[in-house]
Image: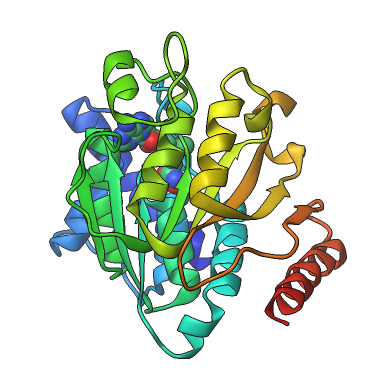
């Protein structure tokens, strides 16, 4: 049996037993299994690499989320996390080569899978922070980060309210999509607010994330591909143009999503700074099917070439 399957079987059987004995959800059972492992009460045999741990946990979370009726119980899969991680590596190549530490925030951290996929890809050069509203998801993220020995500070709060987090070098975020119900708060505190009615939460998340970046920092968003086609797109675009330099818009294959209307793109911006310059050309690209390694390599080569041309 593969290591990841072995780990999944371990978590799954513990989670199943807890679920039955305590009459709780499967995801709560997964949390109990992870905490039991952390406390040393019930530890899987063998040596575990941090990415095997992440993948084993990911499989059990996927099973739990299929059973869960909660709409916010969504996880960013490996495939998307690795693409975001690849871009982070490209944009921070200089700092990473100099062995500098990058600070990274995910303001909608969920289970932590996206943040930890990116952190594990980079190695030991990221200090992470995550914010999440959901009580169970943030506990899962905390246990998962501890087991993977990644330094992540987690905040259980509404990310759109004031935060006590210093400006970061990078934001990664699979933004929650929908309307933000607190219309009064959004109108009083955000530049991007709808002229009438509720503002899109995904727009507010973008503004908040940009606010949390240091000057010259980068944000890597997973956003609905149709984001610039809505009736609130004008306010969003004006805000982005005023405060950032757009770097890249990368369309993801629609086969990765349940419905074509749910397709997402990776949107990369840099917060304006007095010491840096905008890019000459925004990278506009389409990720090919992930099952075609040759086409995928061509895509990565195109990103590298774009970056080289920008550095000239
Ligand atoms: N990247 C995450 C992962 O890998 O598990 C999944 C992110 S999911 C698409 C969006 C997350 O945002 C959900 O976990 C949801 O609970 C959270 N969320 C929604 N509104 C929020 C808010 N106002 N403040 C903090 N978290 C919020």
Apparent side of residue 255 relative to residue 227 in the rendered image (left or right): right
Could you tell me residue 32's position as x and y percent? Answer: 21, 45
| Residue plotted at (15% across, 65% down) | 40
Name above or below for residue 57 compared with residue 160: below
Give the residue drawn at x 29%, y 29%.
189
Q: Is residue 7 left or right of residue 293?
A: left
User: Residue placed farthest to the bottom in the image?
Assistant: 98
Residue 290 vs residue 281, the one in the foreground: 281
Which quarter of the rendering shows the N terminus? bottom right
Q: Quick check: 42 left or right of 182?
A: left
Q: Does residue 60 appear in this view?
A: no
Residue 141 x/y as whole percent: 30, 50
Is residue 229 in view from this perspective?
A: yes
- Foreground pick, 283 / 20: 283
How does the figure colour the protein chain or chains?
rainbow
Locate residue 74, reporting x and y percent: 46, 35
- Extreme residue in the top direction: 197
Q: Residue at x 45, y 68 (%)?
A: 274
254 up-or-down from 109: above or below = above
In the depicted structure, whether residue 199 falls above or below residue 28: above
Q: Position of residue 282 (x, y in %)?
A: 72, 57
- Count of numbered circles on the image: 0
Q: Which image quadrant: the C terminus?
A: bottom right
Which of 90/120 is in front? 90
Report ligand 1 position as a quadrant. top left
Res. 159 image quadrant: top left
Q: Residue at x 57, y 45 (%)?
A: 241
């Amino acid at each position: 049996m593969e290591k990841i399957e072995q780990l999944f079987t371990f978590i799954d059987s513990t989670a199943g037993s807890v679920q039955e004995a305590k009459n709780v959800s499967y995801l709560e059972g997964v949390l109990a299994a992870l905490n039991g492992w952390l406390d040393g009460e019930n530890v899987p045999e063998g040596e575990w690499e941090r990415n095997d741990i992440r993948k084993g946990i990911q499989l059990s979370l996927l099973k739990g989320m299929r059973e869960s009726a909660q709409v916010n119980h969504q996880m960013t899969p490996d495939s998307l996390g690795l693409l975001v991680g690849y871009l982070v590596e490209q944009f921070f190549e200089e700092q990473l080569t100099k062995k500098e530490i990058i600070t990274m925030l995910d303001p909608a951290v969920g289970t932590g899978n996206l943040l930890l996929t990116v952190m594990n890809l980079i190695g030991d050069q990221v200090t992470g922070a995550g914010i999440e509203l959901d009580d169970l998801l943030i506990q899962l993220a905390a246990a998962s980060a501890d087991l993977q020995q990644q330094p992540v500070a987690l905040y259980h709060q509404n990310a759109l309210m004031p935060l006590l987090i210093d400006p970061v070098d990078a934001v990664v975020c699979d933004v929650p999509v929908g309307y933000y119900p607190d219309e009064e708060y959004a109108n009083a505190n955000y530049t991007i607010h709808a002229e009438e009615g509720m503002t899109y939460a995904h727009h507010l998340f973008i503004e908040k994330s940009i606010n949390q970046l240091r000057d010259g920092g980068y944000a890597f968003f997973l956003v609905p591909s149709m984001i610039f086609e809505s009736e609130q797109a004008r306010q969003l675009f004006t805000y982005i143009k005023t405060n950032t330099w757009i770097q890249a818009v990368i369309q993801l294959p629609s086969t990765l999503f349940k419905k074509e209307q749910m397709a997402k793109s990776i949107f990369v911006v840099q917060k304006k700074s007095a010491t840096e310059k905008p890019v000459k050309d925004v990278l506009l690209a389409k990720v090919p099917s992930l099952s075609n390694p040759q086409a995928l390599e061509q895509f990565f080569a195109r990103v590298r070439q774009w970056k080289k041309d920008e550095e000239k």
